[in-house]
Image: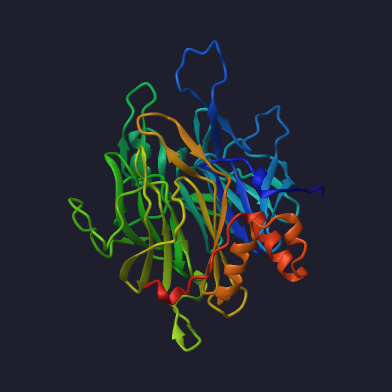
Amino acid sequence: MEEKALDSFTMYTRNGGCAVVHNSLMFVWGGQSSRKVDDEDSDAEDEDIIIPIDLPLEEDDNNVIDVFDIDAKLWWHYPTTGDVPRLGLGSSLCIEGDHIYLYGGWNNYRFSSELYRLSLSTFEWSSIVPKTDVKPTPVYLTTALAYCNRICTFGGVGLRVSKEKQKENGADYDEYAPDPNPWGWNNEYHEYDISAECWISPKVINRPSPVSAMNLTQVDPHRAILYGGRIKNGRSNKLFLFNLQTKVWFEPREPPPRDGPDHSWPSIKSFHSCSCLHDPEVVGRRIGGKTVHQKVLLLWGKYHDSWICPQSWVLEIKGDDIKWTKINLNLKARTWHTACAKFSDSSEVFTKILVFGGNVHVTEGKRDRVETADLKILSFGNPVPRLQTILLNMTSEMPAHLLNRLPQFLRSKVTEHKRIKSIYPAIPIDSLI
């Protein structure tokens, strides 16, 4: 298979894409970018053109998936074949076995409920055709995760459905746009059974309100969390635990009143990210003489159409008890980015969070925004010597003639540091709460 190495500085700027980590590789698909119109004949002031990324049209051959090698710290373009998806904005990716699953999304002014599968051995896409006619409502800004050989999906925004369909799904629908193309939010929950090759809609208890632009994040072997998101009348800061076995939603605590600042709970937001700092499969076990309790990193998001939240938080989960703690990462906030966790292969508590893309600036009252292709790698629980980090930061801007005088081992570290643009000292996980 032909491969092309990419320098990280030349990656597409984008927001709205989706990403997932498998072994030591991060796969990124879809998204969009924008630029100013450069047309003297255009009457529009401050007009943007939205440019799809990796969303090929039928006549295009743009079928690559972007891959970041976490160990080598290099970007690659991997060509793909087969039924290449024509969507990827507001879609969701997840891993089951040696396959990536892509669900939902939006492209060419249409919502989708399609499910695609990418083989990681052949890099061939296949469009999944269920054996029954049952399908989720076409949506984007949705979320999906893999659990017990099933793809579990929740929420999103899409077109209005019939009353019969609403009754069949047992879900709620909040409409926003008027006819002729009414669309709104839903809280549908569906599972695609990979073995049976069909969609099922199990009975769900205590569903959250219809919501989009959020993440359903698995936090232990049988539970997931849902925080915040876009709702009909604004944004939410509610937190829910979801039992993937019993299909019961549980709200461990009501957020405090929103009038006035509160330093014990995050603000309302959407287009944020939630990433686990422990592998969900080891949560509840005893490692190093301690029981592992999950901690989830909540990064930034959008508070208002023209305001990006600058705060970062860590959520600690002990059974049904939760605790929020605000942390300072000294990073520029962004929204509609991707954030993926790479867990250690050893028994050590060591996690890397890879944050890529998104908006870093939004102008009030306009569609004007600034996307980024910046990749940040945050390490948690790794005892990296402080002196090593200081040396790398001091030498990263060193002129070439001085860089060549450094010892080879340090010169290679500095070169690696330049490729990813930023390096941060590891943060002990136990210090976050």
Q: Position of residue 411 (x, y in %)?
A: 73, 65
- Count all numbered tags in the image, as a single digit: 0
**Does 410 sit left or right of 251 as displayed?**
right
> On the image, which quarter does residue 83 sit in?
top right
**Does 420 sit left or right of 138 as displayed?**
right
> On the image, which quarter does residue 347 sit in?
bottom right
Of 35 and 393, nearer the camera is: 393
For image coordinates 26% across by 63% down, the residue present is 264
In this view, 89 is above or below 386: above
Spot the residue most to the bottom.
Answer: 289
Of 392 and 103, nearer the camera is: 392
Q: Position of residue 281 (x, y in %)?
A: 51, 72
Res. 14 visible in picture: yes
Q: Quadrant of the C terminus?
A: bottom left
For image coordinates 52% across by 40% down, the residue present is 371
Q: Position of residue 405 (x, y in %)?
A: 77, 65
Q: Position of residue 276 (x, y in %)?
A: 47, 65
For image coordinates 66% across by 63% down, the residue present is 24
